[in-house]
Image: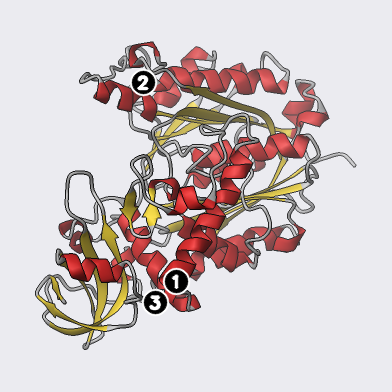
């Protein structure tokens, strides 16, 4: 059966990873990105494929380039390509979906997605007391043709004022609500998280592109230590995305007609079946049910339904793994048991979680495994914000029956996600909805909780009381009635 000419096909994948302890010898982000791009061009087996690229999109990393896609375009000989830059808060799957959709709509025959981050380079420079430099964009357009950014803030002002600047604290608060929903004790829950981490670590040990390839035991993940400090109870460092990595990835797409014209071997083709996403944004503190994520179910099943598949039909799964909660919630939403492999890379804690690029790493690895016939279908999930936005990419070695589907489920999710009014100051009795204990280097632990007021509102309260904090890490406090005085939890 001959494919429609506008069928999008993933024809080239490229990854790059460097680990230079001397930051001055490390590649800066754009060069690491270009290494992955050239690898994707070589991977497809056609020297002219990159020069024909008509659209290039890049998600922002921890760098200051104004138009990295333009820098890529000039380097690969495609100076007229439309360039796009997505800020943090835009799903990486959004870029993949648009790159495929442009081909399906007949607007382009070749598109490219690339991303890179060099967190290890930044870390080594910081340790040396110096700054890692970047070259400026001295030629061509200094601004992209298209700029993408989220429509709303990812954090509620009350969260920021309470010191919840980093995602780990908010995820840990939601994790406690997840634990309470299932009726697990604090210790039982910690055991489950450690076992999940061990399973991911073992996958990473067999992934040649993983940042950490030494498998860790459940106990090494569970217990805090000098090398594995507690971050936000119950999360130790080994539970959290490892973003101090120098990693990049690139995805090269062609129309079926273009791929045939370039004589790219069919053995290299991987078909995007569907891309789905929800961009409905509600800050964590305003979510009525901290353990619920309707977008994961709605967007996930939308991708599967587009291909007439069920979750059990999928051979390869990679669930976004910035923190264990994301894995558990997505698995539950799709009806996937934790006993089956839920990552192809080893996850962001072990394979590496480059700042705004992991979804591309997982997609490259999935395509590699599909090509080697480790399976016929793969589902790669994506998260943006603090479980704020949800995305899925469905891939197969077989072409889609009814063409590529790019699905926006934002409105459906908005109808199902219940919210609460968040107030900045509250005094009186309240019920704990979720909580954690924040641990920061050189500082005493601090308890922090989201509480539901008598009036049905949501507030944030904290405690520095050492005895209370010890109890928070040993007993279940979700669902308990507590006293709040302004912003303080009263023991």
Mark carried by residue 141: 2
Percent position of residue 243, x then y: 40, 37
Residue extending farthest to the right is 1
Q: Is residue 216 above or below residue 153?
A: above
Q: Is residue 261 visible?
A: yes
Q: Is residue 187 above or below residue 21?
A: below
At 38% across and 18% down in the image, what residue appears? 21
Horizontal relation, residue 228 to residue 359: left or right: left
Q: How is the image coloured?
A: secondary structure
Horizontal relation, residue 42 to residue 92: left or right: right
Mark carried by residue 179: 1
At 79% across and 26% down in the image, what residue appears? 260
Query: In this rendering, which labeled residue sits more in front, label 3 or label 1?
Result: 1
Of residues 218 and 241, which is closer to you in this image? Answer: 218
> Which residue was labeled with disc 3?
418
Q: Which badge, 2 or 1, comes first in the chain's sequence?
A: 2
* Residue 242 picture quarter: top left
Q: Secondary structure at mark 1?
A: helix
Percent position of residue 405, x then y: 65, 52
């Amino acid at each position: 059966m001959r494919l429609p000419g506008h069928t999008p096909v993933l024809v080239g994948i490229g990854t790059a990873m460097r680990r230079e302890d001397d930051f001055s010898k490390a590649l800066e982000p754009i060069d690491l990105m270009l290494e992955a791009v050239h690898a994707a061009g070589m991977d497809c087996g056609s020297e002219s494929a990159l020069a024909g690229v008509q659209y290039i999109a890049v998600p922002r990393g921890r760098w200051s380039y104004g138009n990295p896609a333009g820098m890529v375009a000039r380097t690969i000989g495609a100076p007229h390509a439309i360039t796009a830059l997505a800020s943090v808060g835009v799903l990486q799957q959004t870029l993949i979906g648009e790159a495929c959709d442009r081909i399906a709509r007949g607007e382009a025959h070749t598109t490219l997605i690339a991303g890179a981050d060099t967190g290890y380079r930044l870390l080594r420079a910081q340790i040396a007391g110096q700054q890692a430099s970047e070259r400026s964009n001295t030629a061509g357009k200094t601004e992209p043709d298209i700029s993408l950014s989220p429509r709303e803030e990812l954090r509620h002002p009350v969260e920021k004022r309470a010191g919840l600047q980093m995602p780990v604290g908010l995820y840990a608060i939601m994790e406690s609500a997840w634990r309470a929903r299932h009726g697990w004790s604090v210790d039982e829950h910690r055991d489950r998280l450690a076992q999940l981490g061990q399973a991911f670590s073992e996958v990473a040990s067999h992934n040649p592109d993983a940042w950490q390839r030494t498998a860790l035991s459940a106990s090494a993940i569970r217990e805090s230590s000098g090398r594995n400090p507690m971050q936000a109870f119950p999360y130790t460092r080994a539970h959290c995305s490892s973003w101090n990595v120098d990693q990049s990835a690139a995805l090269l797409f062609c129309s079926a007609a273009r791929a045939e014209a370039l004589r790219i071997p069919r053995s290299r083709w991987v078909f995007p079946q569907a891309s789905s996403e929800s961009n409905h944004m509600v800050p964590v503190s305003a979510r009525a049910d901290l353990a619920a994520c309707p977008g994961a179910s709605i967007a996930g099943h939308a991708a599967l339904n587009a291909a007439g598949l069920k979750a059990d039909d999928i051979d390869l799964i990679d669930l976004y793994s910035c923190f264990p909660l994301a894995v558990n919630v997505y698995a539950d939403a799709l009806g996937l048991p934790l006993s089956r492999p839920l990552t192809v890379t080893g996850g962001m804690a072990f394979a590496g979680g480059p700042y705004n690029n992991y979804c591309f790493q997982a997609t490259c690895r999935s395509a590699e495994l599909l090509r080697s016939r480790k399976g016929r279908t793969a589902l790669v999930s994506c998260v943006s914000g603090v479980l704020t936005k949800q995305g899925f990419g469905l891939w197969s070695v077989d072409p889609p029956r009814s063409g590529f589907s790019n699905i926006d489920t934002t409105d459906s999710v908005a109808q199902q996600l219940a919210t609460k009014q968040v107030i900045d100051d509250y005094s009186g009795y309240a019920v704990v909805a979720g909580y954690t204990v924040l641990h920061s280097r050189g500082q005493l632990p601090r308890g922090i909780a989201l509480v539901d007021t008598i009036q049905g509102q949501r507030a944030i309260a904290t405690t520095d009381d050492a005895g209370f904090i010890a109890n928070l890490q040993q007993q279940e406090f979700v669902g308990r009635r507590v006293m709040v005085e302004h912003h303080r939890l009263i023991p």
